[in-house]
Amino acid sequence: MAQIHWFPGHMQKARREVAEKIKQVDIVLEVVDARLPESSRNPMLLEMLSQKPRISILNKADLADKRRTKLWLDAYEKDDQSAIAIDAQHARQLKQIPQMAEKILAEKIARKKARGIRNPHVRAMCIGIPNVGKSTILNRLVKKNVAVTGNRPGVTKNQQWLKAEGNLELLDTPGILWPKFDDQIIGKRLALTGAIAESVFTDDDVALWGLEYFQANYAQALAKLYKLNADELALPAHELMTHLTDKLGFGEEYDRMAERFINDVRKGELGTYTLEVPGDKIAERD
Ligand code: GDP
């Protein structure tokens, strides 16, 4: 996974670039990770949009807890925000995106038609933090492999519009913004899914936080994978981690167990999961 190190200069440049591109589109496709729809958003995008319509795309829905994805979609709907959960990797549900965009922009399209433009195009771009699947979505929507050469902030190239379904046209480079890494819990959620380099934290911190979260929210998955009984599952997270280190044959190499747990989460060995629910921080003990 290519990691971008966000220094203040980078952030300013990314912000300027994205703001410039937003001006050229009719609608923004804000791509987030369905396992952490709030934590994987850029904190500044909303103000940068200044009224520009947006579709929230919860990508990687195949890896997320379906019940919680539904909670998120309901919450967006309650806020009158268009949102869709997709699995871009397997090209699922993508077809609805052009239709949603045309529906949201119906008035604008009608006005253009009234002015004599026969097939007014709808221009869009994907925006999001690194690794949420922007390039995958772009490639699937335009049905060809676009070498996203400018897929780093600050790398500019001649931009092009690529035709997707209907009258949708997409900017060939996604807008890349930084994650909200200044909040500890958000940072740990991002690190656990692999969205940011865990070097921001130690593996131990991330694993311990994750283990506790799974104990509180997905205990059955832990029980099944690591063959744990109710008493073991009820141990404080750090004791359970020590117990697992021994049980899985890592001796006293606590770090190796932490790494193993993080990999199990990322590879989906613990099933589908979502690390946050709309509105509150239920079931988090911190
Ligand atoms: P970008 O940095 O936002 O452009 O992200 P990419 O499109 O490069 O995707 C990052 C990683 O996530 C790649 O390994 C993709 O194969 C993977 N990916 C993208 N979309 C999905 C999805 O819907 N489901 C799953 N499981 N993986 C995905």
Image: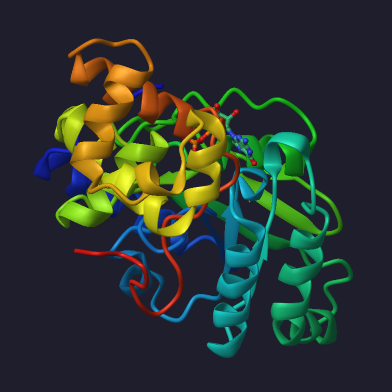
Residue 64 is left or right of residue 167, and the answer is left
Say if residue 4 shows up in the picture.
no
Q: Residue at x 28, y 18 (%)?
A: 246
The N terminus lies in quadrant = top left
Front in this rendered view, residue 237 or 169: 237
Q: Quadrant of ligand 1?
A: top right
The C terminus lies in quadrant = bottom left
On the image, the x and y values in percent for residue 18 come to 37, 53
Q: Residue at x 34, y 68 (%)?
A: 48
Relative to 55, say whether 253 is above or below.
Answer: above
**By what rule are the colours in the image chosen?**
rainbow
Residue 106 is left or right of residue 29, and the answer is right
Say if residue 250 shows up in the picture.
yes
Q: Quadrant of residue 262?
A: top left
Relative to 71, say whether 89 is above or below.
Answer: above
Front in this rendered view, residue 141 or 261: 261
Q: Residue at x 18, y 14 (%)?
A: 252
On the image, the x and y values in percent for residue 276 come to 42, 62
Q: Residue at x 28, y 63 (%)?
A: 43
On the image, the x and y values in percent for residue 154 come to 29, 35
Q: Quadrant of residue 245?
A: top left
On the image, the x and y values in percent for residue 192 come to 35, 38
